[in-house]
Amino acid sequence: MTTKLKAWERPHYAPGGGEPFLFYVIYGNIEKSAPLSRQQYRTLGVPSGIELASYGPSKHPDVPSSFCEGYLWDEFKNQAPNLATQVEGCDQCLILQGTPEEFATLNYLRDTVGLITYLLDQGGCAVYDPLMFRWWAAADWKEQLFVPAAPVPRHHAVILVSDEAKSSLKWFHTRGLRKFGRPDISVRHVPLEYEEGVIDLCNRLIEHMAFGHIVPEGQRINMKSLPCGGIIQHGGDLDDPDFNNVHIEVKLNL
């Protein structure tokens, strides 16, 4: 008998808009012989269309260390030096990646979160999420992604803030929405007085798109905290290094 798990619904889902893509790297000396409890971890295992592969000393031994370099790695070492040292000492990792076959619900994400939690409990120490530009400590992964027992889209995406050429302006941009098959968000040339409104807009869009909504080309922005007359335009491609995804450009009427 198949274990019944609570579905993670997408109440705004409409066909089209893109296919989800997942990519996670799990580090540690992981022992996979322990049975996977579907009820305990709220997972049916690896979702259809997703692959889970092991890389270690006997198979592509260069892979584990290949993620331990560059700006993100340097930031991780500064913020969590002990955990970074532990990751550096790992000679193997697991990579979970691919496009789920079914994404009218978010069950593929539920199964992935539960499966990775199981792997962390079996010896994993950290998870690297390049789509979100984040290294997760095991405890943070469990607290923010597993314990809620819900999709929590804002925990799977990040709002980044970058300086513009003019120092008084900021660029707000997201990463991580490719996990939902939806575009990331870009809002450029944001003055200080509209920063909170832009963050609110990004969070609203993250929630709506993660739950399946497709933002139409030319969508008007109607928020009291932002100027009237702004619109949303689609752009970019999956190879754009700023997002690793297509994106929507929010044009504020400034």
Image (tube, helix red, strand yellow):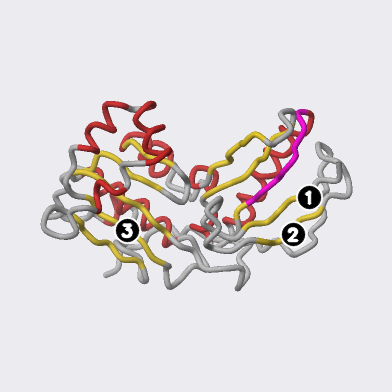
Could you tell me residue 189's position as x and y percent? 75, 40
Residue 191: quadrant of the picture? top right
Dot 3 alpha-carbon crowd within 10 angstroms: few under 14, some 14 to 19, many 20 or more: some
Foreground disc of the pair 2, 3: 2
Image quarter hosting the C terminus? top right
Foreground disc of the pair 3, 1: 1
Per the image, the residue denoted by label 3 is 96
| 146 on left or right of 30 | right
The answer to whether the residues at label 3 and label 1 have Cβ atoms under 8 Å apart is: no
Stretch of the chain drawn in magenta: 185-192
Across the whole image, how many numbered discs are drawn on residues? 3
Q: Closer to the N terminus: mark 2 or mark 3?
A: 3
The disc placed on residue 233 is 2
Q: Is residue 189 magenta?
A: yes
Residue 65 vs residue 46, the one in the foreground = 65
The answer to whether the residues at label 1 and label 2 have Cβ atoms under 8 Å apart is: yes
Dot 2 alpha-carbon crowd within 10 angstroms: few under 14, some 14 to 19, many 20 or more: some
* Residue ID at (58%, 63%): 237
Could you tell me residue 18's position as x and y percent? 57, 68
Image quarter hosting the N terminus? bottom left
What separation in Å lies between label 2 and label 3 (alpha carbons)? Answer: 32 Å
* Residue ID at (28%, 33%): 84
Q: Is residue 159 magenta?
A: no
Give the residue type at disc 1: Lys
Dot 1 alpha-carbon crowd within 10 angstroms: few under 14, some 14 to 19, many 20 or more: some
